[in-house]
Image (tube, rainbow, N blue to C red):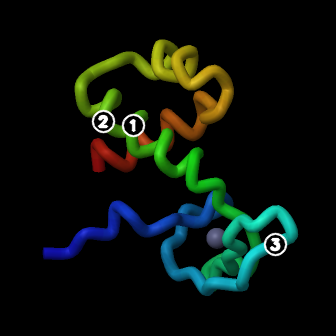
Amino acid sequence: MSDTSHMPSCPHCNGQDLWRRGRNRAGLQQWFCKSCERQFVIDSRQQDLKKVAGRLIVAGVPVPKIAEAMSGFISRRTLYRIRRELNG
Ligand SMILES: [Zn+2]
């Protein structure tokens, strides 16, 4: 069984081939994406929200409704991307 749902993905290219790069001054984990060679930080709260959003999408809740509920933490564009991924 392969469970990669806990793995972060690159916000730029959505790649999962990542290197840890320590933490920044705010204490957030920094990552380096091997695919697009960009560095970024992941806010774990946002990751959790994405998981919740994924469940809502699977449950059939319309994206605009979810975006509203997330009050700007996750953009509509990201939600549509999550939906696209979930639908394969
Ligand atoms: Zn990337």
Q: What type is the residue that disc 3 sits on?
A: Asn
Circle 2 Cα neighbour tier, 10 Å, few/some/many (<14 / 14–19 / ≥20): some
For the N terminus, give its image quadrant.
bottom left
- Which of 20/81 is in front? 20
Question: Residue 29 is drawn in which quadrant?
Answer: bottom right
Q: Distance of mark 2 from mark 3, alpha carbons?
A: 30 Å
Name the residue at 42% across, 34% down.
Answer: 53
> In the image, is 79 to the left or to the right of 27?
left
- Tell me the number on the disc at residue 24: 3
Q: Distance of mark 1 from mark 3, alpha carbons?
A: 26 Å
Which residue, given by chain and number where applicable, does mark 1 sit on?
A: 52
* Identity of the residue furthest to the left in this view: 1
Circles 2 and 1: CB distance less than 8 Å? yes
Q: Position of residue 30 (x, y in %)?
A: 71, 74
Which residue, given by chain and number where applicable, does mark 2 sit on?
A: 55
Q: What type is the residue that disc 1 sits on?
A: Val
Q: Position of residue 80 (x, y in %)?
A: 49, 34
| Above or below, comparing residue 84 to residue 14 in the picture | above
Circle 1 Cα neighbour tier, 10 Å, few/some/many (<14 / 14–19 / ≥20): some
Q: Position of residue 73 (x, y in %)?
A: 65, 33
Q: What type is the residue that disc 2 sits on?
A: Arg
> Which element is circle 1 on?
helix
In front: mark 2 or mark 3?
Answer: 3
> In the image, is 31 to the left or to the right of 44?
right
